[in-house]
């Protein structure tokens, strides 16, 4: 492996500069015809120019991508009492919300998110639902099988303001789609708070438009995964004021941090896992279960808390038949979710970053239908997530992480993930299902970092949570199993090639609900692949990792915006990389590097000496689709040796369409291959190879 010196590169770049630099247009075609795009405009069209899209730094967010000296965010605390009625599949609750105004503004009202209202038949998501296609794949039909909820959404019988002396008065409020505005009798000034109480209920759907809080019947009974389930305060921040984006199901959520005290009353035979730490194990667990949990947490190997043959037996529950209330507390989280069922097998293990350090509890609960897969993979995958993400971002700060099996194949909330994948009814499965469960577990548990702790706005920027998380999932998967098939991973550049060839794309900097096609590739795969390229082939692993950790740690428990991420990496890595941010995030340009000519000249003819090598080789490369990227190419010589040359993206600064590279050598070139490792998602590899014409037979 050879890395040509920057000094040599600089000399040759200067010699190759044409009289008029060729710059990329700000928009236009994506194919080879891009070379003929109009560049006559007398403006700076370079991909390397400064990004005008970034907002000006201010006292809240500075030019280094860090929280500024006057950065602020709101805090919202909740005390919730809720009950699950398994006969009617109904969740009923009452909440006391304490809203702390840390902003510099007086607030005369508070907006809440009512995500369950997406299940209303007159919701915007329902009315915008497209007709079913004529042909529906067999594996997709099960999502349409459950009966629709005819009375979906919230019933809200009470909304009251609690005064400083505890007196309660009915609040003036109105509902708009999936939001509700509560008017305050007196505006809350900076440093003040408002206390609001709300009663509500809803039917837990079997499928639903939300797809995140649902129920499913398995062999031993019903599973309930309860999420986006209570009225939650919307974010008020320095970017949007109130974040009033409606919930359509695709753009997920953006919430304030706060402290939670949640009591969940369920049937006596149910097991509950939730966000937070369980506060009353004596009332909710048997003595045997508590002893098993202590053993599990003392070690690092999964131990059954409830075994498969104990599911549904009296021994699996404390004495009695009355409903049991499970109480959980969670500090500094931005949401709360829970799951409940009488069908759960339960295993757990402990984890410590260092010997003698605090114990992080790892829990997995799943029905017997999910065995033998879940007991083999789930807790092990949680553990790997804690390790990999802890190394690349920051150590997991919460007391526990749970993974719950159910109808939601993959969804995340603080300290709890909902994941799918189960064996066939006879208990058999293919190896690929292990990878499916491990990947979805790593991904969903990994969301604790992004966006549960580094709390970006998912309603607007899918890539900031799904993309960053998919990027880290790639490395977590490799850490979990070095032989993980590359072809099924998000991250390797070649896996994105087909998508990058498609003309029907939108830029990554498109708001979540406006991504109308290829949502998975846009929100997950493309940003993950871009960051892998940036780490491994542009900045270098050590440089990238240092900058990425700095971004992650300075925005823990805060609300970063896209420019904060870009600026953080620029400052931390010491690399402006405007060409990368613009090309990969703000456009749909593709990468098509081509080798168009290779010629050799006698060194004596060129410079009058062969001291530096008998031959001078010139290589002509073109960028034929608008996206500038580093140039890697492999040269094969007549003697069979090979040399890989890696040049930075800066080679395109003076001519973004064509670059001519050259060097002296005593060897004869027989072949050139552009991007030999398929590192840069080249959409047309047919023009990546040059071969010397065969020598005439003498």
Image (cartoon, helix red, strand yellow):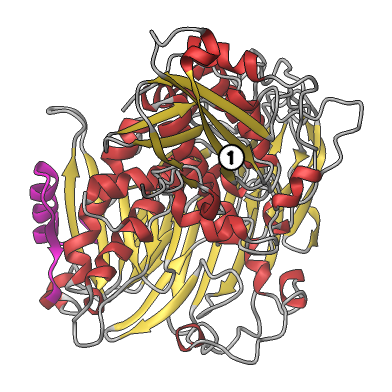
| Residue 421 appears in the rendering | yes
The x, y position of residue 324, in whole percent, is 32, 66
Q: What element carries label 1?
A: loop
Task: Residue under label 1, please give it.
Answer: 456
Residue that appears at 48% across and 29% down = 538
Residue 298 relative to residue 109: left or right: left
The x, y position of residue 485, in whole percent, is 29, 58
Q: Give the residue furthest to the bottom.
A: 134
In the displayed structure, 314 sits above or below 480; it is below
Magenta highlight on residue 335: no
State the quadrant of the N terminus. Answer: top left
Q: Nearer the viewer, residue 635 or 139?
A: 635
Q: Residues within 10 Å of mark 1 (few under 14, many from 20)?
A: many
Quadrant in the picture for residue 92? bottom right
Residue that appears at 58% across and 33% down = 620
Residue that appears at 59% across and 72% down = 202
The x, y position of residue 131, in whole percent, is 71, 85
């Amino acid at each position: 492996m050879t890395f040509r010196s920057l000094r040599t590169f600089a000399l040759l770049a200067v010699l190759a500069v044409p009289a008029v630099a060729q710059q990329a247009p700000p928009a236009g075609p994506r194919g080879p015809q891009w070379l003929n795009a109009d560049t006559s405009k007398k403006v700076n069209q370079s991909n390397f120019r400064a990004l005008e899209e970034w907002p000006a730094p201010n006292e809240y967010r500075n030019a280094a991508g860090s929280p500024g000296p006057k950065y602020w965010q709101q805090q919202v605390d909740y005390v919730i009492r809720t009950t699950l009625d398994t006969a009617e599949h109904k969740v009923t609750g009452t909440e006391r919300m304490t809203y702390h105004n840390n902003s510099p503004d007086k607030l005369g009202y508070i907006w809440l998110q009512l995500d369950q209202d997406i299940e209303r038949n007159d919701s915007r998501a329902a009315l915008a639902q497209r007709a079913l296609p004529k042909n529906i794949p067999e594996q997709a039909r099960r999502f349409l099988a459950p009966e629709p909820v005819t009375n979906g959404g919230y019933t809200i019988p009470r909304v009251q303001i609690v005064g400083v002396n505890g007196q309660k008065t009915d609040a003036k409020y109105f509902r708009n789609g999936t939001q509700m505005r509560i008017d305050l009798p007196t505006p809350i000034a900076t440093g003040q708070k408002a206390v609001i109480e709300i009663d509500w209920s809803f039917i837990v759907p079997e499928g639903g438009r939300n797809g995140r809080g649902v129920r499913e019947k398995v062999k031993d009974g019903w599973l309930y995964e309860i999420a986006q389930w209570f009225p939650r305060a919307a974010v008020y921040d320095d970017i949007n004021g109130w974040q009033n984006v409606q919930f359509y199901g695709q753009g997920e959520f953006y919430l304030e941090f706060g402290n939670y005290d949640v009591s969940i009353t369920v049937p006596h035979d149910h097991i509950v896992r939730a966000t937070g730490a369980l506060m009353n194990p004596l009332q909710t667990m048997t003595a045997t279960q508590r002893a098993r949990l202590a053993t599990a947490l003392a070690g690092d190997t999964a131990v059954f808390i409830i075994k498969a043959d104990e599911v549904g037996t009296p021994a699996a529950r404390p004495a009695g038949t009355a409903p049991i209330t499970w109480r959980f507390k969670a500090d500094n989280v931005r949401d709360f979710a829970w799951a409940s069922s009488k069908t759960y097998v339960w295993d757990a293990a402990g984890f410590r970053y260092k010997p003698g350090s605090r114990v992080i509890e790892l829990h997995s609960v799943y029905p017997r239908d999910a065995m033998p897969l879940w007991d083999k993979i789930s807790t092990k995958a949680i553990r790997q997530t804690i390790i990999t993400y802890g190394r690349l971002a920051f150590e997991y700060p919460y007391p526990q992480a749970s993974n719950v099996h159910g109808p939601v194949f993959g969804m995340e909330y603080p300290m709890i993930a909902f994941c799918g994948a189960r064996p066939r009814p006879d208990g058999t499965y293919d190896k690929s299902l292990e990878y499916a469960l491990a990947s979805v577990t790593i991904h969903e548990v990994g969301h604790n970092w992004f966006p549960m702790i580094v709390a970006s706005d998912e309603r607007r920027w899918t890539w900031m949570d799904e993309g960053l998380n998919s990027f880290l999932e790639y490395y977590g998967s490799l850490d979990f199993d070095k032989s993980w098939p590359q072809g099924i991973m998000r991250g390797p550049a070649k896996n994105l090639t087909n998508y990058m060839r498609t003309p029907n794309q939108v830029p990554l900097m498109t708001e979540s609900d406006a991504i109308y096609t290829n949502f998975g590739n846009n929100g997950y795969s493309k940003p993950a692949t871009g960051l892998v390229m940036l780490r491994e082939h542009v900045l270098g692993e050590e440089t990238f990792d240092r900058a990425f950790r700095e971004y992650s740690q300075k925005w823990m428990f805060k609300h970063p915006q896209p420019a904060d991420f870009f600026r953080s990496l620029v400052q931390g890595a010491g690399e402006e990389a405007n060409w990368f941010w613009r090309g990969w995030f703000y456009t749909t340009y593709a990468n098509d590097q081509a080798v168009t000519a290779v010629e050799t000249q006698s060194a004596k003819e060129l410079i009058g000496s062969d001291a530096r090598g008998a031959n001078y080789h010139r290589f002509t490369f073109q960028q034929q689709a608008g996206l500038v990227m580093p140039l890697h190419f492999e040269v094969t010589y007549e003697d069979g040796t090979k040399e890989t040359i890696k040049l930075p993206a800066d080679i395109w600064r003076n001519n973004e369409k064509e670059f001519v590279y050259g060097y002296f050598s005593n060897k004869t070139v027989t072949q050139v291959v552009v991007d030999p490792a398929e590192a840069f998602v080249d959409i047309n590899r047919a023009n990546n190879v040059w071969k010397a014409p065969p020598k005439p037979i003498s």
